[in-house]
Image (cartoon, helix red, strand yellow):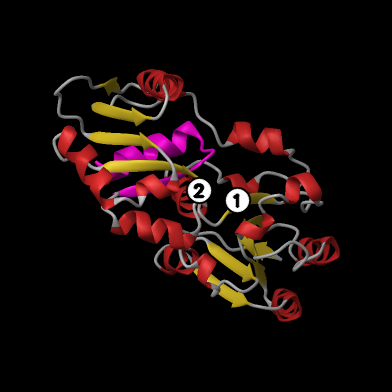
Amino acid sequence: MSIVRGDRPSILVVGDANRPEFSNLVPTLKTTADCWYFTQLEPGIAWLNKAPWQPELILLVQSQPGEIGDAEVRRLQTAAPLSGMCAVLGSWCEGETRSGRPWPGVRRCFQHEWPLLWRAELRRKAGGEAPLWTLPATTRDEERLLAGSRLPGELPAQGSIAVVAGSRESCGALGDACRAGGWTVASGDANPAVILWDTTIDKARNVQQVAAIKAQWGGAPVIALVTFPRPGDTACIIAAGIDAVLGKPFLLDHLFAEMRRII
């Protein structure tokens, strides 16, 4: 049995991807990948057993821990040993690494991380690199993290940014990271290309605060850095005038890619 490869990745999606908390999942896949959707495991495995080829990626969608068990993951891996496997998780799974048993051999991301992760994988594929879903199932989480990170010095300079943060430490850390990535940090009355706002969800939803920050820095687009934004939070933040939302924690490569996209 062969694996299907092409410009558009082939993906088998298992789980209820139509739940509201996964509202950013299907739209990103619709325009970039060829997908087959199965809410239940058994029809998905039956499809794999009949297909003359295997998809590049099996995408597990889970809203709460336990919806898809270890035994079911192993069945999928047995039915499609050549396919990569990734999980998109809902907010109820945020504490799973502390109190539960995450699936072995499966790359994990939360729903708010998915668009950035998917764009990064498509860039790797378009650039002739192997997507991270091709890593072997025995790859540890630390190794996956390192494989998904690039050294900031490898990224080209993009221009000037402004950093707005609630503490001197956060402001300094973000500024240092961006300088290492080739950016310059604006001060005073400069007109930056983008504003990084390290803030809380409530503040980012405040229309007056967003307008004041944009006015202070010449109307530049704002990326809000907030902790674990839910879909409803993200919608409200965007409605308040924010141009992009990045959930914390994040990889610097994802931050720089989002800055370039916004600009």
The answer to which of 102 and 155 lies nearer the viewer is: 102
Question: Against 140, is 125 above or below?
Answer: below
Residue at horizontal 42%, vertical 22%?
A: 177
Q: Is residue 21 left or right of residue 215?
A: right
> Which residue is tagged 2?
117
Tell whether label 2 touches label 1 (CB within 8 Å).
yes
Q: Which mark is residue 109?
A: 1
Residue at horizontal 48%, vertical 69%?
A: 26
Answer few, some or many: residues within 10 Å of disc 2's Cα (few below 14, many 20 plus, some between 14 and 19): some
- Mark 1 or 2: in front is 1
Sequence-wise, the earlier of marks 1 and 2 is: 1
> Split into 4 quadrants, where in the image is the N terminus?
bottom right
Per the rendered image, the range of residues in magenta is 243-263
In the rendered image, residue 81, in percent from the top left (x then y), is placed at: 75, 59
The kind of residue tagged 2 is Leu
In the rendered image, residue 76, in percent from the top left (x then y), is placed at: 76, 66
Question: Against 15, is 28 above or below?
Answer: above
Residue at horizontal 61%, vertical 60%?
A: 90
Can residue 62 be seen from the camera position used here? yes
